[in-house]
Image (cartoon, coloured by chain):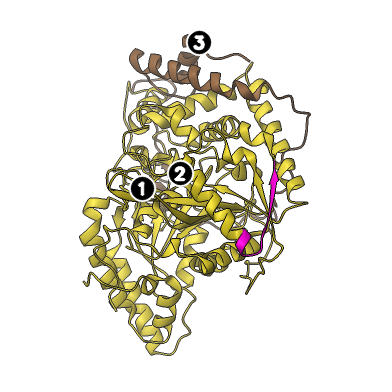
Amino acid sequence: VSAAFEPDELDAWTLAGAHARGERSVSATLDDTLAGIDALDPQLRAVAVRLDESARQRAEMLDAARQHGFPAGPLCGVPVVLKSNLCLAGVETNCGSRVLAGYRPPYSATAVERLLSAGAVPVALAHMDEFAMGSSGENSAFAATRNPWDLERTPGGSSSGPAAAVAAGLVPLALGSDTGGSVRQPAALCGITGFKPTYGRISRFGLVAFGSSLDQIGILARSVRDVELAFEVLSGVDERDATSLDEPPVQRLTQVGLGGLRVGVPSEFFGPGLDPRVRAASEAALAQLERLGCVRVPLSLPRVELGIACYYVLATAEASSNLGRYDGVRFGPRVAGDGSLAGMQAATRSAGFGAEVKRRILLGTFVLSRGYYEAWYGHAARVRAALAADFRTAFETVDVLAGPTSPTPAFRLGERSADPLSMYLSDALTVPASLAGLPAISIPAGFVREGERDLPVGFQLIGPHRGDARLLAIARAFQEATDHHRRRPACEPTGISA
Amino acid sequence: VSSADLETVRALAALARLELSDAELSLLHADLARILAHFEVLARHEEPTAPLPFEGAARVRQDQPVPSRIQEAILASAPEAEEGFFLVPKTVGGER
């Protein structure tokens, strides 16, 4: 494996084209990918389950298909990593939890099936915060993934493994899930591109449920161009998810002019909790958009400041219900307890769930309980509706909303793990779009110096409901004019060789 | 807006089928109190009754049974299964 390679060779777009034309074999790409995982993952700890054998079979099948003249899919031979809450038939999908250790779903998620149909090659399932509850990856029952830009720091979460795998160059493309920012925040902290579509754009069938009214599968890649390539494959209605939008797959827009585009900048995204260096990088990104012809429109969305409280009431309420199914009857290991049914269920759940999951189940049970339901859950639901209306009003006068993705760059592993509230506050800038069901993307916007190292800063663009294609085209135009997304972490010793 | 006292947290844990030691309970009680105090910001904002953003958004399919051929595979994930059923500890009468 060569230490030197051109980053663009890892581009999903370029790889798929080279495979389709027979310029390189899928098997050769896979060999390089697996060698990269061998070399780097012992430090990075992104990979939960390796799929070497099935990936080799798929690669050989794809190479043979090409030799026989079968048409290649748009992701032909592209190695991908899946978050461990996405079902791939027969492969351990444990959601980073001991309660699902050893669980092998008998079916695949719709999104995974669509990746496979497009010719992608899943090479691994990746670590994550248990049941996607966390913002640092440290809530995984199995491994805390490290940030490739600084191995002492968090890659963000909950899609910790997928983000680190893409940032380190192990694969060009990964699927994560985003309930309150779990794709966008790790993308920001790892210096890559992370996209959460409009709620309902990508089927949730086969995504293990956390907060069903918020959960959305998202895409992690090194460029918007690759995100768009995957999104065309993944989006579109699915009969097996009643909340999937009844619309065909989203087609990428060839070009969008930034001249005269109105960029709304909510003052609440630049509040007092924002790291001044992140503020400066975000201001620089806004200035870049203005140089490209955009018009900056200052505005206010006061309910954004209620976002964390609103989100954590609603998401935990939904989680307490969704996680009721892990009771030692249908999945995972069983703990006998006192031998009674209730005792077995309590013993299984208490041994299987980690501290953060228990905390959220209790919080969710509380806000749904009699006497508290109206004051907590009911009120949060109304705030959510009002916040969504605020966004609709804002999009009557602006084309896109912009601001930082995360209030800080990557923090040290362990720094916030003892303080759940400070961890929740990491999500302040990502939960508003989740509550409103809006498409949002984090793109690299620059770097801040932290001791000996540079850490990436992410910039978030939020689009109107169903405005995914235009949002992506705007983000792509920004990347065509900047090179933050091309920079690679120094720890990257391997890659796909030419 | 009310918060949760220690006995309430104990009752919530029982409802949620979680066995917690006294040490775990008091830690979680402190966490919940702190988190809920922070969340009281919600209560200070009065909101009119409004429909939820996604009400009516879900589609329903035709109510037609379709064959499912994965019963065996689903039962294979269970800790204990027998003759097409999930096995659980006995809940009525007799020993076990």
The spot of residue B86 in percent (x, y) is 42, 40
Quadrant, the C terminus of chain A: bottom left
**In this figure, which residue is indicated by the disc labeled 1?**
A449
Asked if residue A252 can be seen in this view, the reply is yes
Tell whether position A293 is magenta.
yes
Image quadrant in which you'd find residue B89:
top left
Instruction: Choose top left, top right, bottom left or bottom right for residue A239.
Output: bottom right
| Residue sitting at x 48%, y 64% | A113
Classify A368 as above or below A8: above
Residue type at mark 2: give it: Arg
Most foreground residue, A479 or B38: A479
**Foreground residue among B1 and A394:** A394
Q: Marks 2 and 3, how far apart in space?
A: 41 Å
**How far from the left and from the top, in percent, is residue A91?**
35, 56
Q: Nearer the viewer, mark 2 or mark 3?
A: 2
Reading the image, the residue beneath label 3 is B5
Q: Earlier in the sequence, mark 1 or mark 2?
A: 2
How many other residues sit within 10 Å of disc 3, few (<14), some (14-19) or many (≥20)? few
The answer for which chain carries disc 3 is B
Instruction: Find chain A in the image and tell me its colour.
Output: yellow
